[in-house]
Image (tube, helix red, strand yellow):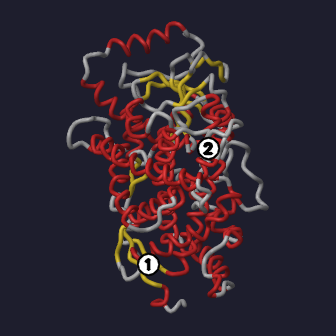
Amino acid sequence: MQGFLSGYLYFLAMEFMVLVTLLSLLILVPTFFLFGHKKKYNGQLPPGSLGLPVIGQSIGLLKALKADRVNKWFQERIRIHGPVWKASIFGYPTVVLHGPAANKFIYTCDGNLLTNTQPPSFSRIMGSRNIIELSGDDHKRVRTALVSFLKLEVLKQYVAKVDEEVQHHLQTHWEGKHEMQVQPLIKILTFNIICSLLFGIERGPEREKMLPLFQDMIEGVLSIPLNLPFTKYSRGILARKKLVPIILQVIREKKKALEEQRNPQKDLITSLLSIHDNESSTIMSEDEIIDNIILVMVAGYDTTSVLITFLVKLLANNKSIYSNVAKEQEEISCKKTYEEANLTWEDLTKMKYTWRVATEMMRIDTPVTLSFRRAKQDIEYGGFIIPKGWQVLLTSSMTHMDDSIFQNPTMFDPARFDKHAPPPPPFSYVAFGGGPRMCPGFELAKIETLVMMHRLVTRFSWELLNKDESFKRIPMPEFDQGLLVHVKPLKEDGVI
């Protein structure tokens, strides 16, 4: 989750920063910063050029991201400089690292060496006590609390609830429709699932009131951080101000239910309130619960919806993959009686091929490709010095597309992840991060994806209305037309 969000938010703030600094006359300060380091560490810095002050390679990288050519952009520079090189990206001198060893270094590094680089402006929306902002003991304490709910043993009991949300979504937004935009609809689904599991708020007026606020907040996070009237960023800040009292009211209602020993709903807020330290005090404050609830909402909203949207496109384009997924899902569906209509965790464990398809999808199209850190002190890595204050950039897709790790990396092949296939080297597949920075929402994303795939392929067939519809990374993949599809219920095709 932290890898997703830190790269996700940082990219947007830095894009804005580039625009501002290009218009700014205060160019001497960053220029001194850039070239001062160059003199001090001459001969020890990685190869590569810092380019023009402030601008550096930022514009080229932004263009590559928006054209979905970021892999090629990095590959060209790795070919010239090797796996460790320097550049100036988004106004800061940066060391770019590549390879499984680099992934391991980033994801397992001591917090005293590297820190996440979430821009201060984003704390206005995300809050200052979210897990990305925390380090040391505070980070461990909050992560432990979040993982206590998001671990597999707990999430297994929520499969039926996720299934109910998916079925209601399909009945409301897909049944009776012929043409639709997939990506916006999947975002609504992920919001409803998150709302149910995190807040314990079922369908109704309260959830409907939260949706537009949440959407404004997300748009604010994904906009230029310019706090002027009528800007998306300003609306995002206002949405947070309106959303926080709603979350706070939910927290206090659930706290009261726990104190009165009423049978509370099992959700993330209740779980966080139920965890106590040795002195019987809750280990998370109300502010920490609020900020981390918002963080999990943002992390789960776009990343899972992007994966599901990519899978919808894949199954429309690849009939062989679609046929194999549909066969696996039909076998599960046919064995269930009417009384066993809802999916269970045992059903999901049988969806091995479907999850291999999803895993391969994330290898080729990782939802978030860039992960930024900041050196808290001089670091020696690979025979070079990373100076204190410099950025460290990791791009996970580079190991995913490395032909020395994955043979024919551009070919879509779910068999790479078959149980009989040799596993990829440690830290070479990092779609969900790795080590202590492994996304704690991984298992929830897996449940959402498998349930949605099951219900889709057993109830509908679909075709792309624009087979050439492209997408750009801003920084998350966003289809130009929302992924337009023509949908038909399977019974019309004579399948069931």
The residue under the point 55% across, 9% down is: 42
The residue under the point 50% across, 35% down is: 129
Disc 2 residue type (three-letter)? Gly
Where is residue 137, by image quadrant? top right
The image shows residue 232, relative to residue 87, as above or below, that is below
Furthest toward the bottom, the residue is: 494
**Residue 124: percent from left, percent from top:** 38, 36
**Residue 49: percent from left, percent from top:** 47, 22
The residue under the point 37% across, 58% down is: 211
**Res. 304 visible in picture:** yes
Closer to the camera, 129 or 333? Answer: 129
Q: Nearer the viewer, mark 2 or mark 1?
A: 1
Secondary structure beneath dot 2 equals loop
Where is residue 482, by image quadrant? bottom left
- Report whether 105 appears left or right of 202: right
Where is residue 236, by image quadrant? top left
Closer to the camera, 126 or 71? Answer: 126
- The quarter of the rendered structure image containing the N terminus is top right
Q: Give me the disc on residue 171.
A: 1
The residue under the point 50% across, 41% down is: 286
